[in-house]
Image (spheres, rainbow, N blue to C red):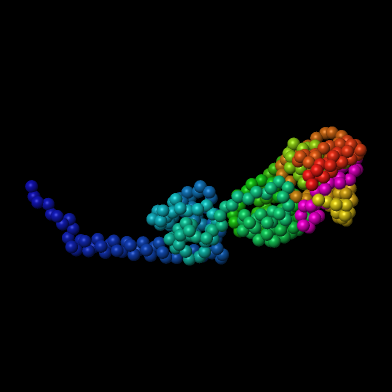
Amino acid sequence: MAKQNSNILTGKQWLLVFIVFFFLIISGYYIFNSPLNYKLDKPLLFEIKSGESFQSVADRLNKLGIVPNKNLFRAAGFIYGAETKIKSARFKIDNGLSYLDLIGLLINGPADYLRSIRVNDGQTIKWLAGKVRRDLRMDSTDFYKKAHDRDFIKSLGLDVPSLEGYLFSQSYQIYERSDPEDVLTIFYNALKEFWTDSLQKRADSLKLSKHQILTLASIIKGETNDVEEMPRISGVYHNRLRIGMKLQADPTVQYLMRDGWKRLNYKDLQIDSPYNTYKYFGLPPAPINNPGANAIIAALYPEKHNYLFFVADGAGKHKFAKSYSEHLRNVREYRKWLSQQK
């Protein structure tokens, strides 16, 4: 048996391998680090959805013309382990990034992340503005102004003074630093989705507009957090509207308090405002908060009864009365309870 040669390659062959290997490294470095040939008038907002694969990201960037060769981009991603490190967020892609720059951006770059935010049942635009500032890093003043911008509101197909009452109560997933217009549109679209044709038909049967139903629902929510009580309170206000009696709803006056919720006094009840239902008949001109599904359904489907009055019972609910004398008796009991708390 012939003796095997221990040297598989000659010196010249090793040199050739080294040159080829060195050339590949230089070429790879150049390819992966050279600016990609795309031009944007402004940074591209690119969203990576929750659970989206790296291959899907590569495909979309390729279709947008950002990544000319998605296989090279995937190869760069493999080197950096990007397939498990990219984050669901919204990124700003500037001109002149290389493959590796893009990978670095998607792994560690600045981005707007998806945040959970809830429009609470009965929350006003004023309080919601503070929440979007905290949870979405948004300018609260811009948000508040846009919610009262007549031109923007008209663009949504609405003819109302503000979006108070039209921002639906539920939880949302929204990107940080989103435009106020986009966020308000999301909140409003949720109400549009909730307000079905059957609910509109029900409002029509009551001879009330959608705006009036939302206004009544906001008052109901202002009166109670007890879902079971909402239809009964709704029944009281429907009864008063039917017989032409003032609503005399405390939440409509509370809405006028600049410093927030307080115990109302006689002077407060004399404020001259169409929102003061102690002075003016009928519903106020617009909702006083953003009611949720339960209050809206209660406004549409009031409990049938003969009650015209109600007062807090001191235990989180209310006592209802059909006559004023019975109501005064309930009021005395409530005031007695208050004095005992002191």
Q: Is residue 248 magenta?
A: yes
Classify residue 175 by image quadrant: bottom right
Camera-side residue: 83 or 2?
A: 83
Q: Position of residue 253 (x, y in %)?
A: 83, 51
Residue 307 vertical position relative to residue 288 in the rendered view, above or below: above
Question: Is residue 135 placed above or below 300 in the rendered structure?
Answer: below
Residue extending farthest to the top is 305
Q: Pinpoint residue 220: horizontal percent, then vertical percent.
A: 78, 43
Kindly tell me whether residue 337 is visible in this rendering.
Answer: yes
**Residue situated furthest left in the rendering:** 1
Give the image location of residue 159, x and y in percent: 78, 53
Q: Which residues are magenta?
A: 241-262
Query: Residue at image x 44%, y 51%?
Result: 83
Q: Is residue 85 above or below residue 139?
A: above
Residue 31 in the figure: left or right of residue 245: left
Residue drawn at point x = 89 percent, y = 48 percent: 281
Looking at the image, which residue is at 41% across and 64% down? 33
User: What predominant SS class does the magenta segment belong to?
Assistant: loop
